[in-house]
Image (cartoon, helix red, strand yellow):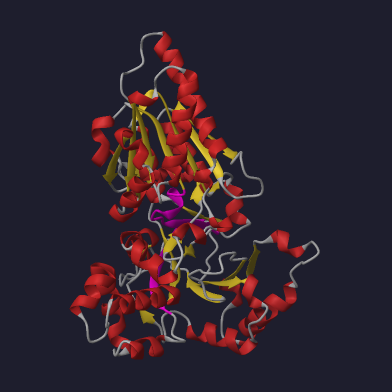
Amino acid sequence: MLVDFRPHSKLSGTSSLDLMTSLAPVVEALREGSTDLDKVRFVCDWVQYKSNFREVVDVRPILQCPQPSARPGPAIVPLGARDDAVEIAVDVRRSAVISLEEVTAALRRGSANGRVLLEDWGPGSRSCVWDFNARYWKDLDLWEKSTGRGYEQALPGGESDAHNRDAARDVIGDLFEVWDALANGDALPEELYVVELGVGNGSQAKVFLDEFRALDAGHGRGYYRRLHYMMCDYSQHVLDLAREAVDEHRARISSFVLDATAPCTSLGFLKYKVFLVYISNVYDNLPTDEVAQLGGRTYRVETRAYLDDATVTELAESVGASVGELPALVHRLLRLGPGLLAETDPTRFADVDAAVSFWRTVWGMVRLEERYVPLAGLDLYSLAPSMSGELLRPLLESGADIRMHVSNGAVASFADSLRLLHPFGRLVCHDLFVTDVHAYRTNFRGPGKYEGSVVNWVNGPLLAHVGRRNGFDVHYAPFAHRAGGNIITMTAQVRD
């Protein structure tokens, strides 16, 4: 049995973890069962997101072939690869309170038995959890009305670093420095474009524009009257709120509903004209796969969403449905939204509020099963449009076993956004970045749940690699204007 205990820091300090209390029930259940311990990986994480998709104990099959096959003959196994059959994953933050009986039941249950499946196996980026994520942003107003609070209050600290005026002034100061140099050489365009992806409630745009106008008044170059600030978001509701927040700057504003993973689809007319692409807390909310290097073999993590079976009968009864009808009902919710769902099914949902309540309850119950499926070859894996999985090789083969995010949506968005930049432009992004691949070996990096949305840390080394391949320097630094947070600032600009 191979044991991988990742949260090393929890084993020391004044409130150190009692390792045996947390792990003994799992080890004892494995010892008493029929599992071949020689083929078990025992992985321990500290899942810091209190709202997440994990059970305390999960069983993850490790497949021998890229896909189940009826063809005769043994599976092809790389020379020296460890031939594991299953991974037992434990959340040690919660495992101290689990009993031997509960662990034994989880191991016996294995995969899917007794659970209400919402989908079949597939890559994580295509899971229906991202349909939940999209529905949240489309109907954010209904969710916020139901919870009685704005989405930003769900963030750590209850607000976004995008509101920080010092950070905005730093970015604007850098812009003015570039523009002054170009203006002195008579090379500054008349129209000065700034693009913000993911505008939230408009507070970042307001802070930026307020500070820009004030600094420009003192600077004396008249940049504000030439500014075109492009607010872009997936949600029309979010854009409407944001436009209200910056109404005093409306002459400088344009807004676009767009897919953040492909900004050039809507903003193609701005290719090579944008001096700043400004992003906060967007990349961590975009679809992602996970890949792993285990025992000398490369795998993709496949997932399938299900409903926690502990209260699923109660949920079905609350809407007058059978347990078997729940998956179809959930997918109708995701397709239509709570407003249309209530309108088309009034016998189950008396009004929109009832449909939103069902939505919130379901989201709280959604879990993800996982399994490892060998990749036939990194060159056959599509990382993002026009990018193969070969870009992952230097990260996956950087040492010991590793499991990491591919950040497909973030990579696609980043690469497409670079095409918008003026030769003297830059991309600035504040987000949850992993900046060292080794960090994936020591800490859980998602997925977690923020209100009705999904959050994952972003694979920073991968984005830096993509940037370099496209002729850009990419730098990471702790967010400079708040101590103790996890937000990292990424800056990308054309290599000198």
Task: Return the residue found at the far front.
Answer: 248
In the picture shown, does residue 314 fall above or below 62?
below
Q: Is residue 30 magenta?
A: no
Image coords of residue 392 (percent x, y): 45, 46
- Would you place residue 450 above or below residue 97 in this image? above
Foreground pick, 474 / 427: 427
* Residue with the most extreme left position: 344
Q: Position of residue 128 (x, y in %)?
A: 34, 67
Task: Give me the residue at 40% from left, 90% from top.
Answer: 314
Whole-percent x, y for residue 170 in the image: 54, 31
Whether residue 405 sits left or right of residue 33 in the image: it is left
Occupied quadrant, residue 220: top left
Q: State the residue at coordinates (41%, 81%).
A: 112
> Is residue 298 in the magenta section?
yes
Viewer-proximal residue, 306 or 184? 184
Residue 452 lies, with reference to residue 267, above or below; the image says below
Q: Count the numbered circles shown.
A: 0
Tell me the quarter of the image containing the N terminus.
bottom right
Above or below: residue 312 compared with residue 393: below
Residue 304, image quadrant: bottom left
The residue at the point 37 percent across, 58 percent down is: 125
Report the front residue among 424 and 19: 424
Outermost right residue: 14
Is any part of residue 260 visible from this angle?
Answer: no
Give, as a single range, the part of the protein colored magenta: 281-307
Please tell me which residue is depicted at 43% across the width and 41% down the height of the picture: 206
Residue 30, percent from left and from top? 61, 81
- Whether residue 137 can be seen here: yes
